Amino acid sequence: MDKNSKFEREIRTTAVDFSFGELLNLHNDKEIVIRPEYQRLFRWSNEQRSRLVESIILGLPIPPIFLVEGTDGVLELIDGLQRTSSVLQFLDHAAIGEPELILVGCDIISQLNDKTFNDLPLSVRLKVKRSPIRATIINKSGDAFVKYEMFKRLNTGGSLLSAQEIRNCSSRMVDGGSIFYDAIQEMAEHHAFSSAISRLPDSFKEKRADEELVLRFFAVTTYRHKYKGNIEEWLDAFMEDVLFNKHKFDLQSERRHFENVFNLIFEKAGDKAFTRFNEDGSPTGRLAPAYYEAAVCAFSENETSIRAMDSARVIEKLQQAFSNEEFLQSAGPGANTITKINARIEAVSKIFGTP
C-alpha cells in the first residue's frame, strides 16, 4: 500500500449539537433511524427515564450519542438509545409507539412527579425541546476495517460503554456484522443459556455481559490458540477475525453446537455449572468466568459421555472438579494466562472424561 492509499483510508467524524426537538423532527421525518438491535430497547425503568428528564430540566450535561451516516444521508443511532428514546417518549410517545411517560422518582424537583410533558409550563416544555445533546456522526462510506477500528477507539478508555457494548456497535460497521451480532444476541436469549447463567448479576447483563459470555464460549472452544494474555483483546481479536474472514467460523453449525451444549448444561446442572460450592455441596455466589470457561469446554468436549450421566452425577463431578487442587491453583490470582486457562480446562475435562 503506497502513502497516498493510506491517506485514502481516512474517514471523518462530525460533532453536532442536536436539540431534542430536532431529534424528534428528524425521527418523524425518517432522517434518523433508531434501531433497537444496537441496544435493547427500554431496559431503563420509568424512574431512570424520569430522572433523565429531570436532569435536562436542571441543565445537567447529558452523555453524547453516536450516529452513522448512510450513503443516502440517513443517520442511524448506534449508541445512546436509552437516552434518546426516553426523551422522545416524553416529548411524543406516539412517535415511538410507547405509552405516555408519566414522571416518577424525581427527587430534586419533586413537583415533576406525576406530570406528563403537556402538564408542564410552556417555558419548561421549551427548555426540554431546546436542550442540546452532542452527537458524533460517523461517515459510513469507506473502508470497513477503518470504520470498525475508529468506533472502537472512540469508545475505548474512560468510555461510558462496556467492552461488549462497543463490540455490539462496532461490529455493525462491517458488512455482515449485523448478521453475526444479531445471532449473538439471539443466542443470549436462548432459554437454556439464559437459565444456566442466571447467577450472572442483572447489573452485568445491563452491560451485555451475557452476550460477552456467548462470545467467550466460541472464543474458548474455537480460538483458544490465539489467546495472548488479555481477555478483552482476545475477544476483540476473535470477533474481528470472524468479521473479516480471517478465522474459519460457520455461524450456523457453531450456533447449533452452542445450543446443544447449553441444552445439556441446563438439563444436567441447571444454574450450578459455573459457580463455587460450599463444603456441604450447595452452590454459592455468582457466576465465575474462570469456572464458566472450564465447564463449557468440558461439556463441549465430553458431550456424549455427559449425556449418559444423570444430573446428580454431573453435579458431583462439577463439585469434584472445582475443588481439585490443580483447578484451584489455575483459577485464582493471575488466572488469565494461557497456561492457567489451559490448566483449568484440562482439570475439569479430565474429571468429566473419566467414568
Image: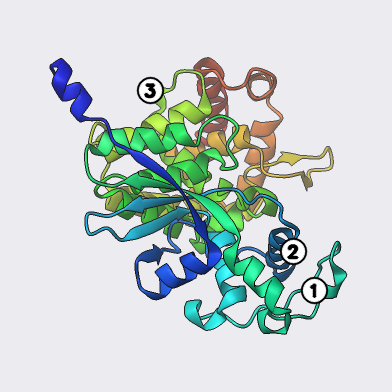
Task: Report the colour scheme.
Answer: rainbow
User: What crowding class fits label 2: few (fewer than 14 Cα within 10 Å), some (14-19), or many (20 or more)?
Assistant: many
Q: Is residue 220 visible?
A: no
* Residue placed under numbered mark 3 in the picture: 226
Which mark lies nearer to you, 3 or 2?
2
User: What crowding class fits label 3: few (fewer than 14 Cα within 10 Å), some (14-19), or many (20 or more)?
Assistant: some
Label 2: which secondary element:
helix
Name the kind of residue labelled 1 in the image: Leu
* Residue placed under numbered mark 2 in the picture: 54
Tell me what residue is drawn at x 52 percent, y 68 percent.
Answer: 21
Contact between labelled residues 2 and 3, with CB atoms less than 8 Å apart = no
Answer with mark 3 or mark 2, whichever residue precedes in sequence.
2
The x and y percentages for residue 128 are 64, 67
Q: Quadrant of the C terminus?
A: top right
User: What crowding class fits label 1: few (fewer than 14 Cα within 10 Å), some (14-19), or many (20 or more)?
Assistant: many
329, 248: nearer the viewer: 248
User: How far is mark 1 from mark 3, CA to CA?
Assistant: 54 Å
Tell me what residue is drawn at x 54 percent, y 18 percent.
Answer: 337
Image side of residue 283 versus residue 344, left or right: right
The x and y percentages for residue 90 are 62, 74
The x and y percentages for residue 72 are 22, 59
Image side of residue 194 versus residue 103, left or right: left
284, 185: nearer the viewer: 185
Answer with mark 1 or mark 3, whichever residue precedes in sequence.
1
Name the kind of residue labelled 2 in the image: Glu
Q: Quadrant of the N terminus?
A: top left
Which mark lies nearer to you, 1 or 3?
1
Snapshot quadrant of residue 220: top left
Contact between labelled residues 2 and 1, with CB atoms less than 8 Å apart = yes
* Residue placed under numbered mark 1 in the picture: 112
Name the kind of residue labelled 3 in the image: Lys
Residue 345, numbered label: none
